[in-house]
């Protein structure tokens, strides 16, 4: 008999596992019936450092913790919870704890990033990792249940779920993490699910079952309780495969409202991108990132008037969108003037990325119409000329620059004087400088050292994939140790550390693909590190890693 009961229970669990994707209501009913064992805190340390073990004292300490995290910038008095709640919920990826946390949330706003951020009691900031798939799904499923379940037991407090700023790149690698694309699709599907239930269109139930449950739809009091709304604020990543799902979620206008702060769109046509932008609410949008979209000048000029309708837009990133004046047509010049006028209508623009727009000698035309000085300028593979750099150095943007990225532009002797002048003008404000893959040799680096010394507020310097020897790098490192704010120097592998036969002069691709002699490299890196330590700059990180360091979000500062 016992064996038969165990077999029957196993089969029941398998059947219920099959329900999860198709019938959330039955899944949560079963989940609620099994929720008999709760997470238990034996003791907690309050803001005075005193251990408390009674239920009321633990509740008071947790109330103070969550109030200060979500309603105040002051976080010095956060209680020590011995990592129990965070570790159980996120480090150990235990979604049941998250479900209960979200279900009982006592405040109108729940910010996932602020929840994960460390305070002075913790040694690790969980927000620096990519979020767990099961944890994010638990948060979204709980919101869906709160908005769709038939209940009159208590008032729901949560009004805003803030998923903005969730890590997408870098962090510790996790096999079950959820990236930006998957997260956007999961949020969109959750919005659609709530909207369907709100309209009484639960497609997972048969017609006969819907007739048996008409009381659920016709109960006026319950429908009124479902009229509550939850705003879901998120950074969205949309491509060709997710476009339809996201569009339907934005059109649904259900009780789970999707608001976009940062939009990244890849491989979308100009018309699809325009449709997506027109569906977004205007106020929250602050960044638009368009990549690999083959827009051309015509596509950009179609979108810029739409972007002008977003009053909070501060960042525009146009990467690999197929604009090249070297192969221009008779309409190219008029198209560029129209583009410049469109950029000028973006009143609050602070960041501009024009990666791989091959617009030599056109920088003055594009930037002179801007009303506000730019703080972030990224001109990777722009095919810069000396006139472009001279304009930038003389423009109002120079003294406000906080990040300058000129990677992928081949620097010759003719480009060094305007670059020196630009660094001199931007020295007081510049925090991030990237000159990767610029064909900088030992000689060219030597001519820039005096200008780099002026950049006393520089926090990060990147010069990877340049043909620089160990001797040239040593001179650069010694100057880096003189910059008091510098914390990171990303440098190339010295040319004398490659195996014999490296082409001279080496190209960008040679430096990436040609084999390195490990013994020579270890010796060279040890010499560089020793020089840094002798200068007392143990805080300065030297690295050859191109991808593991992220620039801080300057829009947040």
Image (tube, rainbow, N blue to C red):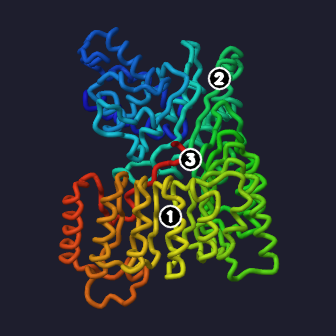
Mark 3 to mark 1: distance in Å?
39 Å
> What residue sits 44% from the left and 29% below the top?
99
> Quadrant location of residue 393?
bottom right
Which residue is labeled 3 in the image?
184
Mark 1 to mark 2: distance in Å?
54 Å
Q: Position of residue 555 (x, y in %)?
A: 55, 46
Neighbours of disc 1 within 10 Å: few (<14), some (14-19), many (20+): many
> Which comes sooner in the sequence, label 3 or label 1?
3
Q: Position of residue 404 (x, y in %)?
A: 52, 61
Could you tell me which secondary element the residue under label 1 belongs to?
A: helix
> What residue sits 45% from the left and 74% below the top?
437
Q: Relative to 523, is 5 above or below?
A: above
> Which comes sooner in the sequence, label 3 or label 2?
3
Which residue is labeled 2 in the image?
228
Neighbours of disc 2 within 10 Å: few (<14), some (14-19), many (20+): some
Label disc, if present, on residue 515 of the rendered structure? none
Could you tell me which secondary element the residue under label 3 belongs to?
A: helix
Q: Position of residue 369 (x, y in %)?
A: 74, 59
Residue 389 falls left or right of residue 96: right
Q: Position of residue 326 (x, y in %)?
A: 68, 82
Could you tell me which secondary element the residue under label 2 belongs to?
A: loop
Q: Nearer the viewer, residue 113 or 35?
A: 113
> Which mark's residue is nearer the viewer, 1 or 2?
1
Q: Nearer the viewer, residue 155 or 510?
A: 510
Q: Relative to 199, is 57 above or below?
A: above
Which residue is labeled 1 in the image?
423
- Can residue 174 be seen by looking at this rendering? no
């Amino acid at each position: 008999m016992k064996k038969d009961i165990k077999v029957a229970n196993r089969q029941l669990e398998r059947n219920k596992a099959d329900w999860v994707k198709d019938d959330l209501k039955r899944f949560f009913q079963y989940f609620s019936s099994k929720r008999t064992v709760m997470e238990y805190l034996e003791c907690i340390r309050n803001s005075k450092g005193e251990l408390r073990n009674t239920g009321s004292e633990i509740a008071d300490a947790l109330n103070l913790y969550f109030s200060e995290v979500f309603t105040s910038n002051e976080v010095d008095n956060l209680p020590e919870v011995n990592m129990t709640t965070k570790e159980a919920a996120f480090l150990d990826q235990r979604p049941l704890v998250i479900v209960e946390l979200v279900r009982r949330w006592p405040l109108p706003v729940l910010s996932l990033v602020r929840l994960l951020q460390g305070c002075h009691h913790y040694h690790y900031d969980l927000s620096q990792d990519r979020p767990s798939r099961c944890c994010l799904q638990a948060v979204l499923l709980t919101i869906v249940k709160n908005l769709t379940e038939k209940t009159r037991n208590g008032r729901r407090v949560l009004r805003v779920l803030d998923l903005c700023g969730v890590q997408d790149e870098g962090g510790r690698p996790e096999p079950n993490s959820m990236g930006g694309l998957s997260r956007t699709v999961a949020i969109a599907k959750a919005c659609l699910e709530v909207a369907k239930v709100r309209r009484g269109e639960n497609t997972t139930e048969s017609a006969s079952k819907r007739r048996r449950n008409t009381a659920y739809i016709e109960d006026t009091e319950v429908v009124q309780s479902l009229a509550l709304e939850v705003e879901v604020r998120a950074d969205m990543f949309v491509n060709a495969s997710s476009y339809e799902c996201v569009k339907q979620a934005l059109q649904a206008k259900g009780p789970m409202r999707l608001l976009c702060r940062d939009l990244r769109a890849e491989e979308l046509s100009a018309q699809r991108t325009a449709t997506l932008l027109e569906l977004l609410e205007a106020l929250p949008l602050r960044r638009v990132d368009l990549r690999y979209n083959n827009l051309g000048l015509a596509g950009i000029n179609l979108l810029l008037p739409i972007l002008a309708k977003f009053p909070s837009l501060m960042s525009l990133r146009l990467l690999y969108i197929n604009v090249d004046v070297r192969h221009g047509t008779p309409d190219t010049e008029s198209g560029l003037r129209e583009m410049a006028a469109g950029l000028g209508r973006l009143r609050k623009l602070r960041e501009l990325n024009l990666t791989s727009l091959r617009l030599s000698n056109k920088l003055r035309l594009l930037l002179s119409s801007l009303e506000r000085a730019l703080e972030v300028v990224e001109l990777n593979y722009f095919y810069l000329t000396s006139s472009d750099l001279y304009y930038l150095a003389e423009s109002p943007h120079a003294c406000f620059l906080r990040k300058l990225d000129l990677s992928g532009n081949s620097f010759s002797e003719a480009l060094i004087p305007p670059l020196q002048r630009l660094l001199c003008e931007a020295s007081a404000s510049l925090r991030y400088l990237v000159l990767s893959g610029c064909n900088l040799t030992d000689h060219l680096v030597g001519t820039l050292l005096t200008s780099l010394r002026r950049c006393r507020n520089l926090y990060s310097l990147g010069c990877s994939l340049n043909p620089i020897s160990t001797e040239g790098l040593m001179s650069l490192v010694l100057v880096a140790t003189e910059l008091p704010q510098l914390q990171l120097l990303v440098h190339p592998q010295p040319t004398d550390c490659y195996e014999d036969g490296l082409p001279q002069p080496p190209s960008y691709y040679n430096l990436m693909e040609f084999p390195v002699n490990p013994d020579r490299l270890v010796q060279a890196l040890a010499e560089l590190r020793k020089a840094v330590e002798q200068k007392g700059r143990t805080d300065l990180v030297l690295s050859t890693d191109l991808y593991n360091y992220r620039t801080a979000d300057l829009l947040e500062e």
